[in-house]
């Protein structure tokens, strides 16, 4: 009886320890495996990059932001695409110029963009005549950005972002920050800005 007990106790302990170790291992996932937790275990906001771009300058910046922030990305596309002539700002009655001069112009968007899953939106656009292209007004008026944290970015030949930010804020959007980049913005410049947010 005494001998039997002496043999069973170590077996019993081994079984208990194995069960405990297995349970702990199954319940402990490394934090980095959860995309919604940062390395401090804090919940991260789900973010999306939404951009409009006709000659790819803003698109390039948008893609860097997408990669650096682990965001999803959506392109705002015009239902009636812009031709090269449409974008010629040297022709006074080109489509883009007529739209920018018309307070009522709201170019239609090809497909609805559903941002309900996201808290923070990086909104990108080129500067057209000092401010946002009118299709951005169309987008804002879909209410997709209501209640979101909006971080704006733009590209331009030389104009700043300020006037366009006033347009966004005029809609009552919660605009956290905004930054203008040149067409040749480096990845490093974009990264530094993202770190500063
Ligand atoms: C119709 C039109 C108006 C523009 N107006 C301005 C402007 O007021 N100031 C400026 O610096 N650049 C202006 N640009 C240049 C664009 O902002 C610049 O080329 C931008 O990087 C284009 O971005 P995208 O390639 O993403 O379309 C204008 C371009 C177009 C087509």
Image: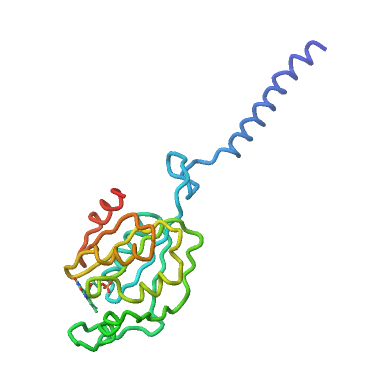
| Residue at horizontal 37 percent and vertical 81 percent from the top | 107
| Residue at horizontal 69 percent and vertical 19 percent from the top | 10
Indicate left or right for 168 with 94 as reference.
Answer: right
Residue 163 image point, x, y percent: 25, 66
| Residue at horizontal 38 percent and vertical 57 percent from the top | 174
Q: In front: 165, or 189?
A: 165
Residue 80 image point, x, y percent: 38, 85
Q: In front: 51, or 35?
A: 51
Residue 162 image point, x, y percent: 24, 63
Q: Is residue 39 above or below residue 161?
A: above
Position of the N terminus, as image quadrant, is top right
Name of the residue lying farthest toward the top: 2
Q: In front: 16, or 59?
A: 59
Indicate left or right for 90 with 143 as reference.
Answer: left
Instruction: Locate residue 98: give its quadrant.
Output: bottom left
Q: In front: 125, or 187?
A: 125
Q: How many marks?
A: 0
Residue 42 image point, x, y percent: 46, 42
């Amino acid at each position: 009886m005494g001998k039997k007990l002496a043999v069973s106790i170590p077996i019993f302990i081994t079984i208990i320890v194995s069960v405990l170790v297995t349970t702990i291992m199954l319940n402990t996932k490394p934090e980095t495996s959860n995309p919604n937790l940062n390395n401090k275990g804090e919940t991260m906001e789900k973010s999306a990059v939404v951009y409009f771009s006709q000659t790819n300058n803003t698109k390039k910046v948008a893609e860097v932001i997408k990669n650096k922030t682990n965001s999803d990305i959506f392109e705002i596309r015009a239902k009636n695409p812009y031709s090269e002539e449409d974008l010629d700002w040297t022709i006074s009655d080109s489509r883009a110029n007529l739209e920018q001069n018309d307070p009522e112009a709201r170019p239609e968007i090809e497909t609805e963009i559903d941002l309900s899953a996201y808290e923070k939106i990086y909104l990108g656009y080129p500067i057209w005549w000092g401010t946002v292209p009118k299709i951005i007004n169309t987008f804002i008026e879909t209410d997709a950005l209501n209640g979101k944290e909006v971080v704006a970015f733009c590209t331009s030949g030389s104009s700043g972002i300020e006037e366009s930010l006033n347009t966004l804020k005029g809609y009552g959007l919660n605009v956290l920050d905004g930054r203008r980049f040149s067409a040749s913005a480096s990845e490093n410049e974009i990264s530094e800005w993202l770190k500063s947010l």
